[in-house]
Image: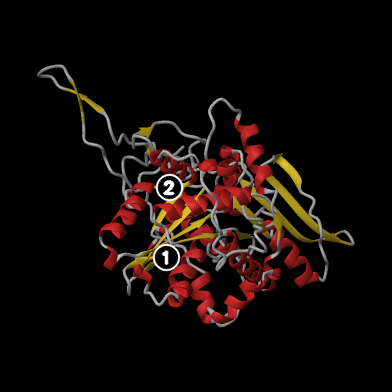
Amino acid sequence: ASRISAENWQPSLRLKDPPLAGAAVEREALREERSERDGEAQKLEKAKITLNDCLACSGCITSAESVLITQQSHEELYKMLTFNKVTPTEQKLVVVSVSPQSRASLAAKCKMNILETAKKLTSFLKSLGVHYVFDTTFSRNFSLLESQREFVKRFQKQSEDKKALPMLASACPGWICYAEKTHGSFIIPYISTAKSPQQVMGSLIKGHFAEQQHLTPDQIYHVTVMPCYDKKLEASRPDFFSQEYQARDVDCVITTGEVLRLLEQEGISLPDVDPAPLDTMFSCIREEELTSHSGGGSGGYLEHIYKYAAKELFGIQVDTIQYKPLKNKDFQEVTLEKDGVVLLQFALAYGFRNIQNLVQKLKRGKSPYHYVEVMACPSGCLNGGGQIRVEGEASKDWLQQVEKLYESLRTEAPEENQRVDELYEQWLGGPGSARALRALHTQYHAVEKTSTGFNIKW
């Protein structure tokens, strides 16, 4: 699949990483054609790449760069807000859920702290006509808790099920696309079924929140702000679509960079915006304080599952985690030992070079790990393809600024959030219930490879 530029929808014919096995040849979506009659250059019509055209090769999807999805852009958000203004009797409730990684990127760009950025962004979005602005840090609590419980269950039945372990993280849609379309039925059993924070938020907004507002899911337009273009693909999966209401859990995904373009189109500088109170219905806010989760800018899945499993399975309290870098900083491991015996061995694998190595080890039966936090982007979600880039500044220095802002928040364990406990009972009927399984878990699908002339073995 071609890599499409967010600015002009034209493909770039270069690969970010070495080609993956079975990758498709990149195709030209737009080219100049010479006319033999008059010798003038003529441009063909701009091609539109639909979700079904995506091959999850080493181009647009797995490198987390610009992808043309016409149903999801800041322009589509504009259309919905305009629709609400001209047809007030039929308007939809517009809800925006913002990822903490996106807030950190905006804060670095605008030279503000995280809380100030959150308040000003809330004010700006509401000035456009958005009704509610929430924080996906809250929904990540559910994703972490479900992942923890799933890991313990898998660990306990590993003697019965050879593919119970290692459990592989499922929060990164770039990695999921690659797994489904490149390794299919082999790799899928290893992947955690817990939904990502974005999709948990989708379930929460179109489920519990809709009920609270006395609305049906199709009467709410739910937008998320994400650091990653692949999140647009995730929101578009058939698994997250209600046939009954003909509505998606997440209707539109815009990237951090698209928020910046929204500001530019409105002629507004975020630092100049008057702050607004934060919506606290779904948040981790205490006395005007935003919280986060420990364990890095990709959500801290490894750290939270590791600590939970150590205590739940072996009665060992782990307060700090010592990471051991291996081939590079994006492949590190953590080991829990007792009396010289390895009890748990976890790893994080970021970027496709490390992911490919991990998959090859699995296929050879030589992976020593019980759990792996897998992310498509080198350095994880804070370095996502949809984040803001600054010209003239080294990417490493810029990323460090974003990381520093992200880590400035007070961390909170998901088990400590009282509002999460309340919602497990009010919304889901308790952890482990059938309703919780439907709302917080999903499934994956092996995509059969088609035999075409475009297939190349690298």
In the rendered image, residue 209, in percent from the top left (x then y), is placed at 47, 72
* Amino acid, disc 2: Ala
Which secondary structure lies at badge 2? loop
Which secondary structure lies at badge 1? loop
Q: Tell me the crowding category of disc 1: few under 14, some 14 to 19, or many 20 or more residues within 10 angstroms, Cα based.
A: many
Cα–Cα span, label 1 and label 2: 22 Å
- Residue 207 lies, with reference to residue 453, above or below; the image says below
Q: Is residue 308 visible?
A: yes
In the rendered image, residue 391, in percent from the top left (x then y), is placed at 53, 28
Q: Residue at x 54, y 32 (%)?
A: 390
Q: Nearer the viewer, residue 387 or 260?
A: 260
Q: Residue at x 57, y 62 (%)?
A: 190
* Amino acid, disc 1: Asp
Residue on which disc 2 sits? 56
Q: Is residue 111 left or right of residue 270?
A: right
In the rendered image, residue 163, in percent from the top left (x then y), is placed at 60, 65
Residue on which disc 1 sits? 249
Mark 1, mark 2: which one is toward the viewer?
Answer: 1
Q: Residue at x 39, y 31 (%)?
A: 13
Q: Which mark is residue 23?
A: none
User: Is the Cβ of the residue at disc 1 closer than 8 Å to that at disc 2?
Assistant: no
Q: Is residue 351 visible?
A: no
